[in-house]
Amino acid sequence: MDPAYSIIVFTTASGAGYGLLVLVSLLAISGALPPTTGLGLAAIGAPAALIAAGLSSSALHLGRPERALGAFSQWRSSWLAREGVAAVATFAPLGVFGIGWVFFNDVGGFFAGMAAACALLALLTISCTAMIYASLKPIQQWRNGFVLPAYLALGLYTGSLLLVLLTRMFGVYRPAFALLAVVLLGLAWAIKWGYWRHIDAAPTQISLGAATGLGRLAEVRLLESPHTEANFIMREMGYEIARAHARKLRAIAHVALFLAPLALLGIVAAGPPILAQLAALAAVLSAALGVAVERWLFFAEARHVSMVFYDRAG
Amino acid sequence: MTDLPVAPSPTRLGLVVDLDTCVGCHACATSCKEWNTGGHWGPLTDVNAYQAEQRGVWFNRVFTYEVGRRGEEARTVHFPKACLHCENPQCVAVCPTGASYKRAADGIVLVDMDRCIGCKLCAWACPYGAREFDEDQGVMKKCTLCVDRIYDDNLEPADRVPVCVLTCPTKARHFGDFNDPESHVSRLVRERGGFDLASELGYRPTSKYLPSRPRRSAPQESSQPEASRTASDPASGLLRWVDRALSR
C-alpha cells in the first residue's frame, strides 16, 4: 500500500497525542500531577495540539476535504466514521477538564469525571484508527490480531515519552513515570516483534489461479496488462518495497523507536538533572523518527489482494 | 446509511462474462469509457491524456492471461474485470459518508459523487480493484452497471443493457437478473459452470464468469489428411493456399 505522508503524520501524531492524554488524565485523577496552571496548559495543550495537527493532516489525504463533515454520519458501519466521531467527541471533556485544571486548578470531582471521559474516549479513538486497518480483508498484513494492540501500545508508549519530557520540564517528574515508559516500551516492542514475525510467516492470501478462477484449468500467468501505464489501483495498492530495504528500515525502527529511547530512559532515571533533561528530549525525538519509520513500513509492507490480478504479490 | 440493505433485493442485476468467447478486443472497456464519460457519472477524467504517465479512470479493464504450461499447451484467456456488484460489498460498509451505497431494489453498487470525500477507503476494501479514484474531481468512481441506460424508457428495449454488453462483438457479456432462476444469465451460470472470483474472501459477487471450454483435441488432421500433409511443409506458402482452396 502507498505510504501517504499525510496518514503517517496523522496516525503517529494523534496516536502520541491520545496516548499522552490518557496518561495525563489518569495521573491527574490519581493526584500524581499537581493541578497548577502552567502544567495544565502544557499537559492539556500538548495532546490537544498533537491531535489537532494529526486530524488536519488526515484531511489533506481527502480528495474533497471541504465535505469532511459528512464523514461523521456512518458510524454504524464504518470504522472511519467511528474514528471521526470519537476523535471530535474527545474534545468536549478535554475542554472542560482543561478549564478545570488551568483556570480553577481543580482536577477533582466533576473535573475528574471529565478526565476519565477523556481517557476513555482517547483509547476508543486509537482503537477506531487501528480497526480501520484491521477490518480490511484484502490486506492480510493489516487484518490480524497484532494491529489493534500495536496501535494502542505505540500510542501510549510515545505518549509516555512526552509525559516524561513534560514532567521533567515542569519539575514534577517522578521516577515512576520513566518506569511506566519502560514498561509501555517493552509492551509495544514485543507486539511489533510479534507483528513482524507474523507477517513474515503468513503465506500469500490468494493465488492468481484462485483469484481469476482459471486455476481450475491449469497454472496461470499474466500475458498482457490491461494498459501500458500504471493505473490508480497499481499506484495506490501496488507500492512495493524491496526486502533488503524493509530489513534495514525495520532495524532503524527497532533502534530509533525502542532501543535508543530505552537507553535514554536509563539516563533520565539515573543521570544528573541537566543530562536527564536532554535525554528525555532525545528520547522523544528518537521515538518520533522511529514511529514514523514504523508507520511507513506498516503501509509499505502491506499487500493488497487486487494486485494479484496484475500477477504481483497480494 | 451505508448499512447494507437488510432484505435481499427483489432483483439482483449483474453480468456474466464468458471467458471462452472473449477475444480481448477491449471494445467493452472503450465503449464503457465512452458512454460513462458523457453520462451521469462522467467525466472519466484522463490526466496527461496525450503524453507519458497517463492517469485515467476506467470502469472496466481487460487482462490477458496465459493458462497452462508454457509452449504449445498454453492457451490465452482474455479477462475483462469491472465491479462485480457484490452481495457483501465491504466498499459500502467502510464508507464514512454514505456516498457508497447498494441499491435495495436491484443490488447495484453506486457512488453518490456529491457526498464522496475521496478518502479512498472503499478502494482499499475492494479485493477486485474495481474502484478508481478521479484525482481531478477528488471523488471515487466505479462501474454503475449502466444504471443510466438500463432503465431509460427513451431507449429501444434491446438497448436497455449495459453498454459493454451491447458492444461486445463476440457476445461474451450477458446482463440479467440472477434472482430469476430462469433468466438468461442464471441458465448460463447453471449450464456452463459459472463461478465467483476469489469466492474465499466472502464478498459474494453477483456477476459471474464462465470458464473456457475444454480444449479440442489438437489439430484435426484426421478429417483433412490432404490439407494437413501439405500444410506441414513450411516452404509451400502459395501451394498451401492453392491446396486449401481446392480442397474446400
Image (cartoon, coloured by chain):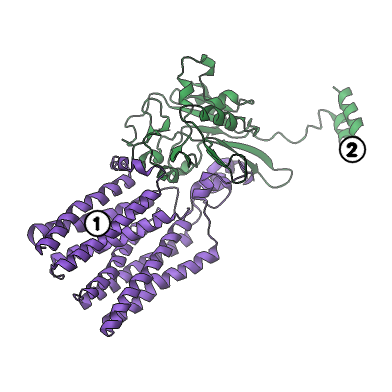
Chain colours: A purple, B green
Q: Residue furthest bottom?
A: A272
Tags 2 and 1 on a common chain: no
Helix, strand or loop status at disc 1: helix
Picture quarter containing residue A182? Answer: bottom left
Give the foreground label among 2 and 1: 1
Q: Depth check: A291 or A40 in front?
A: A40
Q: Is residue A221 visible?
A: yes
Q: Amino acid at mark 2?
A: Asp
The disc at residue A122 is 1
Q: Secondary structure at mark 2?
A: loop
Question: In this figure, which residue is indicated by the disc labeled 2?
Answer: B233
Find residue B98 and report its horizontal and vertical position in percent.
34, 37
What's the chain of the residue with tag 2?
Answer: B
Q: Is residue B174 left or right of residue A87?
A: right
x%, y% of residue B5? Answer: 33, 32
Q: CA distance from mark 2 to mark 1?
A: 80 Å
Which residue does the image show at 46% across and 32% down from the upper left?
B206
Whole-percent x, y for residue A98 in the image: 16, 59
Q: Amino acid at mark 1?
A: Ala
Comparing B57 with A215, the one in front is: B57
Q: Where's residue B66, x and y in %?
A: 65, 43
Relative to residue B211, is residue B144 drawn left or right? left
Q: Is the Cβ of the residue at disc 2 closer than 8 Å to that at disc 1?
A: no
Rendered residue at 62%/40% (across/down): B50
Residue count near mark 1 (Cα–Cα under 10 Å), binned few <14, some 14–19, many ≥20 = many
